[in-house]
Image: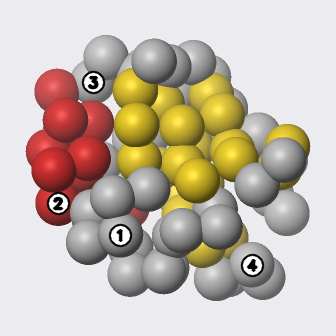
Amino acid sequence: MCPRWTTLTGGKIMAGEVIIDTEECIGCEACVELCPEVFAFDSDEEKASVIEGADGDAACVDEAIASCPSECITKE
């Protein structure tokens, strides 16, 4: 996995307030296309991930959450 990504912990990848439930992620890359400054695609796992240190308050995060077909992205 690329070093700029956070580590996988209990089926969830976290960075700041944005969380992706990797068990539910279908790897469609919608979040990556909408918000590349926060989300990346892990081609080995075929799942999206949150970029470590990314701004969880970026304007595009809410759009990515709303556009996720598997509803696996949340903000805390």
Task: For marks 3 and 4, give the one nearer the viewer.
Answer: 4
Residue type (three-letter) at the residue carrying disc 1: Ser
Q: Earlier in the sequence, mark 3 or mark 1?
A: 3
Query: Quadrant of the rendered structure where residue 24 is?
Result: bottom right
Q: Is residue 21 above or below residue 69?
A: above
**Crowding near pointer 1: few (<14 within 10 Å), some, many (20+)?**
few
Residue 7 image point, x, y percent: 84, 43
Query: Quadrant of the rendered structure where residue 19 is?
Result: top right
Quadrant housing the C terminus: top left
How far apart are the alpha carbons under marks 4 and 2? 21 Å
Q: Left or right? Give the position of 23 relative to 73.
A: right
**Crowding near pointer 2: few (<14 within 10 Å), some, many (20+)?**
some
Residue 64 image point, x, y percent: 24, 50
Q: Which residue is identified by label 4?
A: 45
Q: Left or right? Give the position of 31 relative to 40.
A: left
How far apart are the alpha carbons under marks 2 and 3? 15 Å
For image coordinates 51% across by 70% down, the residue present is 25
Secondary structure at badge 4 equals loop
Q: Which residue is identified by label 3?
A: 58
For image coordinates 17% across by 27% down, the residue present is 59
Residue type (three-letter) at the residue carrying disc 4: Glu
Task: For marks 3 and 1, give the one nearer the viewer.
Answer: 1
**Res. 67 mark:** 2
Q: Earlier in the sequence, mark 1 or mark 4?
A: 4
Q: Which residue is identified by label 1?
A: 70
The answer to whether residue 15 is seen in the rendering is yes
**Crowding near pointer 4: few (<14 within 10 Å), some, many (20+)?**
few
Residue type (three-letter) at the residue carrying disc 3: Ala
Q: Are marks 3 and 1 in contact (CB under 8 Å)?
A: no
For image coordinates 33% across by 58% down, the residue present is 71
